[in-house]
């Protein structure tokens, strides 16, 4: 790949390369660009044990200059899932969803809510980022 992205916050966490900061209360938080920090913000509130959100701020610089957009990427992680295989995709309109429990172990919470990645419509686009510019 000509312009490989930085590892995701989940990959960095899994490899022990991240400092995890758990957000326990509402407030204003500042998240540095992911290429410039090992800090990863995590939200557990509202999720069962082992399930949480990871937040990272993706900025178009350096090797990530060619990204389609910049902004906040939110990862949904469910460590209770055995694997992240394609047969676990789940999305609105799928028979029995969300009660069928189908979702990836690690997935981008896409800002546009279209579930394009789960539907295999694309490999990610500028509408997956949470941006203050839109």
Image: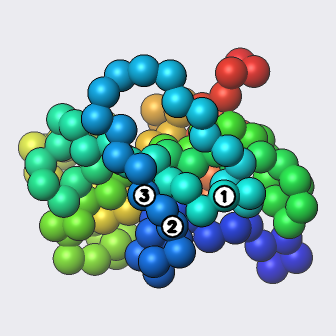
Of marks 1 and 2, which one's residue comes earlier in the chain?
2
Q: Is residue 78 visible?
A: yes
Q: In this view, does 9 lie above or below 4?
A: above
Count neighbours of disc 2 (C-alpha within 10 A) and say few if under 14, some if 14 to 19, many if 20 or more: some
Quote the CA–CA distance across marks 3 and 2. 6 Å
Q: Can residue 122 be seen in this view?
A: no
Question: Circle 3 sits on which residue?
Answer: 20
Viewer-side residue, 58 vs 84: 58
Question: Circle 1 sits on which residue?
Answer: 37
Of marks 1 and 3, which one's residue comes earlier in the chain?
3
Count neighbours of disc 3 (C-alpha within 10 A) and say few if under 14, some if 14 to 19, many if 20 or more: some
Q: Where's residue 104, x and y in %?
A: 32, 61
| Point 50% across, 22% down: residue | 28
Q: How many callouts does the rendering have? A: 3
Specify the quadrant that holds the C terminus. Answer: top right
Q: Where's residue 62, x and y in %?
A: 89, 61
Direction from residue 134 to residue 47 in the image, left or right: left
Q: Is residue 43 above or below residue 11?
A: above
Quote the CA–CA distance across marks 1 and 2. 8 Å
Question: Circle 2 sits on which residue?
Answer: 18
């Amino acid at each position: 790949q000509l312009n490989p992205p930085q590892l995701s916050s989940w990959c960095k966490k899994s490899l022990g390369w991240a400092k995890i900061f758990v957000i326990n209360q509402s407030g204003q938080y500042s998240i540095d660009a992911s290429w410039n920090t090992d800090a990863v913000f995590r939200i557990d509130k509202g999720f069962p044990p082992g399930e949480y959100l990871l937040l990272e701020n993706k900025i178009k610089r350096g090797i990530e200059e060619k990204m389609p957009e910049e902004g906040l990427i939110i990862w949904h992680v469910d460590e209770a899932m055995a694997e992240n295989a394609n047969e676990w995709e789940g999305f609105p309109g799928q028979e029995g969803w969300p009660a069928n429990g189908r979702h990836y172990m690690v997935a981008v919470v896409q800002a546009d809510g279209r579930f394009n990645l789960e539907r295999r419509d694309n490999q990610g686009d500028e509408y997956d980022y949470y941006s203050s510019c839109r």
